Amino acid sequence: MTISPTALSEVLLIQPKKFEDERGWFSESFRLDLLHKALGRCLNFCQENHAQSSYGVIRGLHYQMPPFAQSKLVSVPYGKVLDVVVDIRKGSPDFGKHITLELSSENQKQLFIPPGFAHGYACLSETALFSYKVESYYNKDSEASIAFDDPKLAIDWQIPMGKQVLSSKDREHPTFEAAKYFDYKIDI
């Protein structure tokens, strides 16, 4: 398993090693000890969530505010998504910047996303299963979000306008300028 930095500080790309032979393949998809070593701190994942989506579904941009902020370890066991992470840590050198990365059952890439980042994804395959471990339980009162189509962020979701499918809730998110932020020095 290799763990590498991304263009957003503290967001990590994880690439499990895949061992193949005539029977198929084997991979260690999760190693808490390696994540602890890469982060220099312990993680306490307490919940795992799965979401199935069809082509064109966009979910996000979501996050939880302290004291229920969540680290996430995200992966796609089936299908393909475009994963999007936005730095919302006011005072961070990356504040307001985002990265996109294709996660799929084929490439088996994963992302570790610490608190202080908004997260979303778009389903690029006919169907996809999205999986994520979280470090805090969901708390409705701590829920926060940003509009997926905010022009300031200019995210290319790789889904044509007429094919985008969103929940009514995801269509109502505030702009980046009106969103709640983390304080880079205090909340992290």
Image (spheres, grey):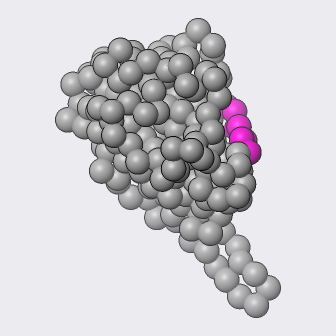
What residue occupies the far front of the structure in this picture?
162
**Above or below: residue 102 compared with residue 63:** below
The quarter holding residue 114 reads: top left
Q: Position of residue 16 (x, y in %)?
A: 56, 65
Does residue 43 appear to the left or right of 5 in the view shown?
A: right
Q: Which residue is found at the position 35% from the left and 27% from the top?
A: 88
The quarter holding residue 180 reads: top left
Residue 165 lies in the magenta stretch = no
For residue 30, say whether it is visible.
Answer: no
For residue 186, say whether it is visible.
Answer: yes
Residue 49 lies in the magenta stretch = yes
Q: Which residue is found at the position 61% from the left and 21% from the top?
A: 169
Q: Position of residue 70 (x, y in %)?
A: 53, 28
**Above or below: residue 42 compared with residue 111:** above
Q: Which residue is found at the position 20% from the left and 35% from the top?
A: 93
Residue range of the region highlighted in magenta in the rendering:
46-52
**Above or below: residue 93 compared with residue 53:** above
